[in-house]
């Protein structure tokens, strides 16, 4: 059974004319009758090709400033009629409705208009009505009509009609229908999310049309995909394709380093979404060396990120380490040359863009959506819970440790000294276990914890953690507070001349 259908007529009405001319010329060459509107009609006329104005078949002009052009039974009847349906065929003849075998249409650039900061009036005018209706009609009737709904599909469509003299298979018509519904659903999602910024209806809609299949997912037996505009956020200078796990680690690195934007040179090394080393120093080289000292074992195969340009001396040090990804706002020419010496090492320049304000993850048979944790603990919000107040150096370290703690898996304890991560206990089921893990790790890498500080992502229900910290030499603690037994920890700190501050904000990261 031959399911191919030859295009004998086409409706063309597009916002963007880029790449359209070769298609129009090919259709004309194949004796296809072309219908069009407004600017597209003029464009086709200017090519010296005969075109029939939609008004000539509807006997109705474009009205309301162009808001209504194609919304007419003769247009939609031409698109939606079933050519193997006796009743449809009879009505087509009765009402003198022309057959339309192909619809080439795109949509007003709604998302670009919103992103440009345009006025609400301009944004509303970019909500396409005729175009979206034509797409839905043509895609629905894919058995008889082909719908080309995006400039990105022009080349493929031109190849199809050129190769088969205008005949399109049912398989190709259905595939183009899927592309069209992808366009229309994404468009409607963008419009809904624009309106729902204020309304806050309890509905969750997300649509990403930029999709990339990854080598595999979290493990080789799992398929993996990334949906998003990676190139909008990074310039990839060098290296292999990023994996699923690389992307998760890059996300963790970027979110952590955003806490230190605009500050002195800060360098972090991450492994499995957690910082295994981070330090702030006068130069980026010093910051890198101090971060590496935090855990040179875990740094192997890690993700590296800097909040300032990576220079030649730093690149020389990094080059001695096997690492997957290096991220920075820029690289000096010499640094880039050095780091590109390893074939697979991925180098990313991070661009300035606004990240989403919500986080999304699958859960059970649905999704969990929440606001991002955008609170960064600062000196202004601290409550001094103990008689002993942290000195200036301790206060700086407390806030430094708090920023790291916020981006480390719960339950977590972070130990820091001199704006350097000494160690952290990550993802433990007990806060005491997290602290003990951190102390043991710090000692294993020869950190002297005398005068170090401790950050906790949640309150202490018992004084055991502050007692263990005190015995390890830690002199100051930052934690949210809020336990009904806070006083037990406060009393211990007062008795042992420790300083403890409350932030009032819990930073669980599950």
Image: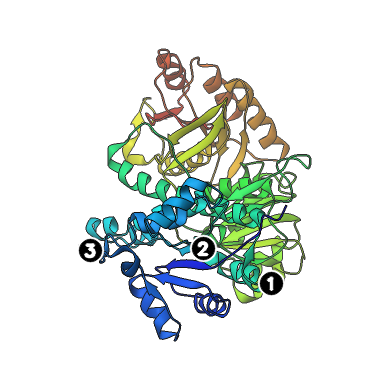
Residue 145 percent across, percent down from the top left: 53, 57
Q: Which residue is mark 3?
A: 63
Q: Are marks 2 and 3 in contact (CB under 8 Å)?
A: no
Image height check: is 378 above or below 468? below
Could you say which is closer to the camera, residue 221 or residue 19? 19
Question: With 314 as the anchor, is 115 left or right in this view?
Answer: left
Q: Quadrant of residue 432?
A: top right
Numbered circle sitting on residue 70:
none
In the rendered structure, which disc, 3 or 1, sits on the residue that comes first in sequence?
Answer: 3
Could you say which is closer to the camera, residue 468 or residue 410? 410
In the rendered structure, which disc, 2 or 3, sits on the residue that comes first in sequence?
Answer: 3
Residue 252 percent across, percent down from the top left: 57, 45
Numbered circle sitting on residue 102:
2
Image height check: is 305 above or below 295? below
Residue 261 seen in the figure:
no
Residue 242 seen in the figure:
yes
Q: Are marks 3 and 1 in contact (CB under 8 Å)?
A: no
Question: With 178 as the anchor, is 336 left or right in this view?
Answer: right
Q: Which residue is mark 1?
A: 163
Residue 449 percent across, percent down from the top left: 60, 36
Tell me the crowding category of disc 2: few under 14, some 14 to 19, or many 20 or more residues within 10 angstroms, Cα based: many
Residues under labels 2 and 3: Cα distance? 24 Å
At x 75%, y 45%, the residue is 297
SS label for mark 3: loop
Tell me the crowding category of disc 3: few under 14, some 14 to 19, or many 20 or more residues within 10 angstroms, Cα based: few
Residue 285 percent across, percent down from the top left: 61, 62
Could you say which is closer to the camera, residue 360 or residue 48? 48
Quadrant where the C terminus is found in the figure: top right
SS label for mark 2: strand
At x 54%, y 75%, the residue is 27
SS label for mark 1: helix
């Amino acid at each position: 059974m031959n399911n191919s259908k030859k295009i004998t007529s086409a409706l063309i009405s597009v916002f963007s004319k880029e790449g359209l001319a070769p298609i129009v010329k090919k259709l004309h060459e194949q004796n296809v009758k072309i219908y069009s509107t407004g600017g597209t009609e003029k464009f086709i006329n200017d090519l010296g090709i005969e075109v029939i104005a939609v008004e000539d078949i509807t006997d109705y002009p474009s009205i309301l400033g162009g808001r209504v052009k194609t919304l007419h039974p003769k247009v939609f009847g031409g698109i939606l009629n079933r050519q193997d349906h006796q009743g449809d065929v009879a009505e087509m003849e009765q009402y003198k409705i022309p057959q339309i075998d192909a619809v080439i249409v795109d949509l007003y650039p709604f998302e670009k208009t919103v992103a440009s900061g345009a006025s609400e009036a301009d944004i509303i005018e970019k909500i396409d009505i005729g175009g979206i209706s034509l797409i839905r009609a043509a895609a629905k009737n894919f058995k008889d009509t082909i719908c080309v709904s995006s400039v990105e599909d022009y080349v493929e469509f031109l190849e199809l009609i050129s190769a088969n003299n205008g005949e399109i298979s049912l398989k190709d018509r259905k595939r183009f229908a899927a592309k069209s519904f992808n366009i229309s659903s994404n468009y409607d999602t963008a419009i809904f999310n624009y309106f729902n910024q204020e309304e806050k209806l309890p509905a969750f809609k997300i649509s990403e049309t930029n999709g990339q299949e990854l080598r595999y997912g979290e493990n080789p037996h799992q398929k993996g995909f990334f949906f998003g505009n990676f190139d909008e956020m990074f310039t990839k200078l060098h290296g292999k394709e990023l994996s699923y796990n690389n992307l998760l680690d890059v996300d963790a690195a970027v979110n952590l380093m955003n806490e230190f934007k605009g500050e002195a040179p800060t360098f972090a090394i991450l492994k499995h979404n957690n910082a295994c080393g981070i330090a702030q120093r006068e130069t980026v080289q010093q910051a890198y060396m101090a971060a590496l000292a935090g855990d040179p074992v875990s740094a192997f195969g890690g993700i590296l990120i800097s909040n300032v340009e990576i220079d030649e001396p730093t690149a020389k040090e990094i080059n001695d380490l096997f690492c997957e990804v290096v991220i920075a706002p820029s690289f000096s020419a010499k640094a880039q040359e050095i780091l590109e010496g390893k074939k697979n090492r991925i180098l990313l320049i991070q661009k300035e863009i606004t990240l989403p304000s919500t986080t999304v993850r699958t859960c059970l048979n649905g999704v969990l959506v929440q606001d991002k944790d955008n609170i960064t603990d600062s000196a202004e919000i601290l409550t001094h819970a103990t008689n002993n107040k942290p000195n200036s150096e301790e206060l700086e370290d407390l806030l430094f440790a708090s920023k790291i703690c916020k981006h480390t898996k719960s339950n977590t304890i972070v130990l820091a000294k001199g704006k350097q991560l000494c160690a952290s206990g990550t993802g433990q089921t007990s806060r005491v276990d997290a602290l003990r893990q951190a102390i043991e790790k710090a000692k294993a890498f020869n950190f002297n914890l005398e005068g170090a500080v401790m950050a906790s992502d949640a309150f202490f229900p018992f004084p055991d953690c502050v007692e263990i910290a005190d015995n390890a030499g830690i002199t100051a603690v930052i934690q949210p507070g809020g336990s009904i037994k806070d006083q037990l920890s406060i009393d211990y700190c007062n008795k042992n001349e420790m300083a403890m501050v409350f932030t009032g904000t819990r930073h669980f990261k599950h």
